[in-house]
Image (tube, rainbow, N blue to C red):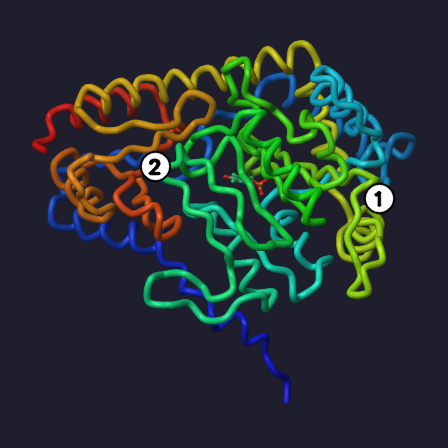
Amino acid sequence: MAQINENYLKLQAGYLFPEIGRRVAAYQKNHPEAKIIRMGIGDVIKPLVPSVIKAFHEGVDEMSKTESFRGYGPEQGYDFLRNAIVEHDYQTRGVNLHSDEIFISDGSKCDSGNILEIFGPDNKVAIQDPAYPVYVDSTVMGGRTGNIQDNGFYQGIRYMPCTATNQFMPEIPTGKVDIIFLCYPNNPTGTTASKDELKKWVEYALKNKAIILFDAAYEAFISEKDVPHSIYEIEGARKVAIEFRSFSKTAGFTGTRCAFTVVPKELMGYTSEGKAYSVHALWYRRQTTKFNQVSYPVQKAAAAIYTPEGRKETREIIEYYMENARIMRESFTELGFEVFGGINAPYVWINSGTGMKSWDLFDKILDEAHVVGTPGSGFGPSGEGYFRFSAFASRENVLEAMNRIRNLSL
Ligand SMILES: *Cc1c(COP(=O)(O)O)cnc(C)c1O
């Protein structure tokens, strides 16, 4: 008898996006004339930039000739890409990494979920609430939780509420946790962590031999000078942190697939007897056993982001999205909403200030403005009352959506 992993049965049925789809479809059916604008899902809309496409084509052409054909590539990714990452993403910010510490992958979603495999089942996992759903669901799948409770929390996870009350920066745990997911700039709240705040987390992790899993998928959207781009800008972080970065949002690679994870060599985990063991060695073993890298043309396309033209072209697209975010911030502020994010991240996180629940606000905005956003409660119980708008939309749609929203009756 083949037994299933029953931890999967604890997972809440994929609730958020199907429920949004259901409500939008029902509304459209009853109001066929309504022109609905969707600003809910965090997927980019702009095509790959010209220098990326050029490199991508060249990579494909190389695969067509015996002399330049490539089979399996290097285990951690091609040197040309890892060296470009080390130089442009890290050296320029005073962070020295070795290219051996970079693992190219096909996504931060996979990496941030798979990473838990190399850690023991008894680790206490701390997760921001609200959060990108991968962290909670992967923790559940790995058997590190009990069942979900009526309040929406799984037993066994240490939730760290992030609301306006604490400026979306969770308190340092009072007890002991072993693995800490942090995402900055944050999805869904769009907020950032200062160096001083990250320093406290690194100190906590050093003191408690904990590991920080730092998701920096939105690093490229940081516009303010003093916001750290990498956890490794904090002294000591190399001993306690893994960093996830992705080209998905940075350069429109959501459908092309390329990302990377940094595992410093001096990062240690511990056996149950307390013996230190290299986490890098474990991740290397995991990846070389279960993963065979990203295709050569895709890695070549990703490396083009780091050329002078590639940087300029991707920067322009990021600025386009961030102008959308600025317009959204302004409109909601005018309406009297509390507005967060949208300065260093492509998400605007709003609260009506009237105590209205997330799903009620969803229905109201759909009904009165024919605009779709994402209810904050879908990202975790502490997101209740909030609402997320994504800046990954055309300017035309953003302007039209904001015009309609300005006329909302609140
Ligand atoms: C979009 C996103 C990612 C990127 O995932 P990929 O698998 O690289 O496309 C990672 N983390 C967060 C929080 C995201 O929103």
At mark 2, the secondary structure is: helix
Which is nearer the N-term, disc 1 or disc 2? 1
Callout 2 amino acid: Thr
Which of 305 and 274 lies nearest the eye of the viewer? 274
Residue 190: percent from left, percent from top: 42, 31
Q: Crowding near pointer 2: few (<14 within 10 Å), some, many (20+)?
A: few
Q: Residue at x 74, y 25 (%)?
A: 85
Q: Residue at 92%, 31% (x, y): give it.
A: 67
Residue 75 image label: 1
User: How far separated are the C-alphas under marks 1 and 2?
Assistant: 45 Å
Rendered image quadrant of residue 89: top right
Is residue 74 placed above or below 283 in the rendered structure? above
In the figure, is residue 268 to the left or right of 35?
right
Q: Mark 2 — residue?
A: 165
Number of residues whose C-alpha sits closer than 10 Å to that of mark 1, classed few (under 14), some (14–19) or many (20 or more) = some
Q: Secondary structure at mark 1?
A: loop
Residue 172 spot, x, y in % from top left: 53, 43
Instruction: For ligand 1, give the image quadrant.
Output: top right
Which residue is nearer to you in this view: 64 or 290? 290
Beta carbon at label 2 within 8 Å of ligand 1? no
